[in-house]
Amino acid sequence: MIEHLGEPGGVLIVDDTGFLKKGTRSAGVQRQYSGTAGRIENCQIGIFLAYASPRGHALIDRAFYLPEPWIADPDRCRRAGIPEGIEFEIKPRQAMAMLARASAAKVPFAWVTADEAYGQVKYLRVWLEAHDAAHVLATKVNDTLVTTGGREARTDELLAGLPARAWRRLSVGAGAHGPREYAWARVPIRIGWQPGRGHWLLARRSLSDPTEIACYVCYGPHRSSLLDLAWIAGTRWRIEECFQQAKNEAGLDQYQVRSWRAWYAHIPSRCSPTPGSPSHDPLWQKGNRCHRGGHDRIHATGNPAPAHQTGLACHRHRRPHLGLVAVAPPTTTSSPPQPLQTTRLPTHLTAVAVLDV
């Protein structure tokens, strides 16, 4: 993926999708909300990480969501092949682990985006900011934010006072029926900005129905324009395209396996670090941040404050050799899996692995 799609300004996108199932024996299945169906259904849930750049987009990592009632029933877990020691993790925590793995694997990216199921989780926003990861995360219209005056206010209250001239009509990509055009506006929030960084509330308003408003909490370079933030917000739809293509063309949701391991074998395996790189734990590592020098479109001018010296590694684009990557084994703990072994192939060959589950 890095060889063909990697760009310094790439975007990591987090989202989950449901796999409708019948019965009660498939690992992790239960009646729960599925965005695929748009309602509560009997299903399994997978959390995915996608990568998008001007070169294209692809799914690069996945995590199986195991509901808490399953953890409380060891016999049921054993029958579904779920390894002992698996602990309950909510979806934002699983998303954090995948983002950490992407950083450890030196995936070149500059922004993170996700829908409000993840964006409204404040500790996820704090975690990203603490590691200087620029992000545009959707949130609820009644979320509370700290204003530039130091008080708390709801997002809809902050937007209600905006003059008409604050809204700009922008297109952030092509939709099924032409350009996706909305009215966009932003409001500075938070006090005590770090040098070269900024915080904003971003809003997207429907042109046909002004009462239909989506909100985003943003953190990034101080010089980021309204168009920059709107474009990153629009990039989130790339993962929806990934899901559609993977399900319609590659059979992502067409499986009859029931076990934990078989699910991980069927779902596309993750991008792994190159052989010989050290193992990483699930926390962010100290890394070389992208500075000025041709691709500092995301990070602002100036040196970061000492509190940001330990941050998300923003890696320059490299061109590794193509390799045949082994399917990642299912994790037995909440820690990310170790790097996979590869067998190098000539760069002009494409390898396809077929696994009999």
Image (cartoon, grey):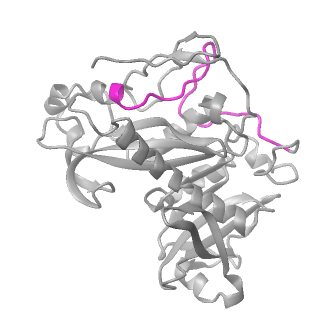
Q: Is residue 214 left or right of residue 268?
A: right
Residue at 61% from the left image edge and 28% from the top image edge: 105
Residue at 42% from the left image edge and 20% from the top image edge: 327
Q: Is residue 253 above or below residue 92?
A: above
* Residue 163 appears in the figure: no
Residues shaded magenta = 264-291
Viewer-closest of 130 and 337 = 337
Q: Is residue 120 within the magenta segment? A: no
Residue at 76% from the left image edge and 62% from the top image edge: 224
- Residue 27: image location, x then y, percent: 22, 35
Query: Looking at the rendering, which quadrant does residue 245 occupy?
Result: top left
Q: Is residue 199 left or right of residue 261?
A: right
* Residue 29 appears in the figure: yes
- Residue 206: image location, x then y, percent: 52, 78
**Which residue lies most toward the left here?**
23
Viewer-closest of 345 and 215 = 345
